[in-house]
Image (cartoon, rainbow, N blue to C red):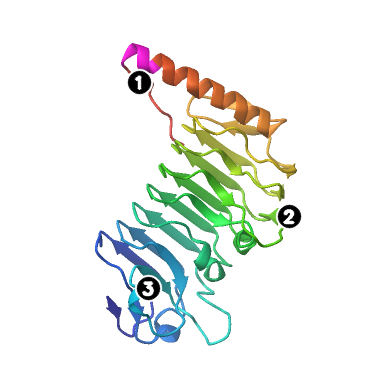
Amino acid sequence: MTLQRSPVASLPLTCFPILKFLKSLNTSMIFSNLEKIEMVDCNFKELSPYEGDVGEERDVTMLLPRINPLHHICTTLETLEVHMCGSLINITRASSSLRNLTTLEVWYCKEMVELITSSKAQCLEQLVTLKIDGCEMMREVIASDDETTDEIIFKELKCLELYDLQNLKSFCSGNYTLKFPSLDELYVSKCPAMENFCNGALSKPKLQEVQTRWDVRRCWDLNATIEQLNKEECEVSEETGKNGGHREDHVP
């Protein structure tokens, strides 16, 4: 799929299950004002900055446009919505393109095991809203990698939603210090495998409660709250199985 010259603020990619490659003939002009990308039902395995000719081995990569030949990539991009992209593994390779991202939504990406690696997570420092829903293979949001990282700060993140992530074990299982100085909304529901929020130190000075699909919990110790929610989710699942019914979900 090739895009011609025309300034674009929002780029919807909807219902292209066989779309594997997106290319602009003049990226510096067409994407200079790009603020939002929507990907729905696309067959990309990964997102990556555009760096020249694309070989055959990269035909399942969505290449994000490079704005100039140095390091500023999609500098105006504020919103990325990725829905039902069943082959997408993570967004790690695209991290350099997402430094000014404020909203990230990932829904029903069935092959995604993690969102991003620990060394690249700092690229999301401007993120305000993060919503992840229905990614059945996801085990953690931030995965450990080989690069040395002691501290991860989401300085602008205010809203975090984790919903229907059946294999999620933890937001981050690595031994990192996580800091959320602005976080005041946390929604966690239908994550029955979630054992804790993180294994390292955690700072969340503004967060006082966790919203679930049924109620709101006071949150002094987030790991303890997650552990209790996990226990209750398991009990509900057992009860539902016995009764052959289900309890209505509340989605914020």
Q: Specify whether residue 9 is in view.
A: no
Q: Which mark is residue 58?
A: 3
Q: How would you rate the neighbour count of disc 1 (Cα within 10 Å): few for under 14, some for 14-19, many for 20 or more? A: few
Residue 79 painted magenta: no
Q: Residue 78 appears at what percent x and percent y? A: 51, 65
The quarter of the displayed image where residue 124 is located:
bottom right
Q: How would you rate the neighbour count of disc 3 (Cα within 10 Å): few for under 14, some for 14-19, many for 20 or more? A: some
Between marks 2 and 3, how big is the CA–CA gap? 33 Å
Q: Magenta residues? A: 240-244
Position of 238 relative to 167 (above/below): above
Residue at 61% across, 64% down: 123
Q: Which residue is mark 2?
A: 151
Contact flag, marks 1 and 3 (Cβ < 8 Å):
no
Q: Which residue is mark 1?
A: 246
Disc 1 vs disc 2: which is toward the camera? 2
* Quadrant showing the N terminus: bottom left
* In this rendering, position of residue 175 left or right of residue 47: right
Per the picture, the main secondary structure of the magenta-coloured stretch is helix
Which of disc 2 and disc 1 is earlier in sequence?
2
Position of 132 relative to 95 (above/below): above
Q: Residue 227 appears at what percent x and percent y? A: 61, 27
Label 2: element kind: strand
Between marks 1 and 3, how big is the CA–CA gap? 43 Å
Residue type pointed to by label 1: His
Q: Which mark is residue 149?
A: none
Residue type pointed to by label 3: Arg
Disc 1 vs disc 3: which is toward the camera? 3
Which of disc 3 and disc 1 is earlier in sequence?
3
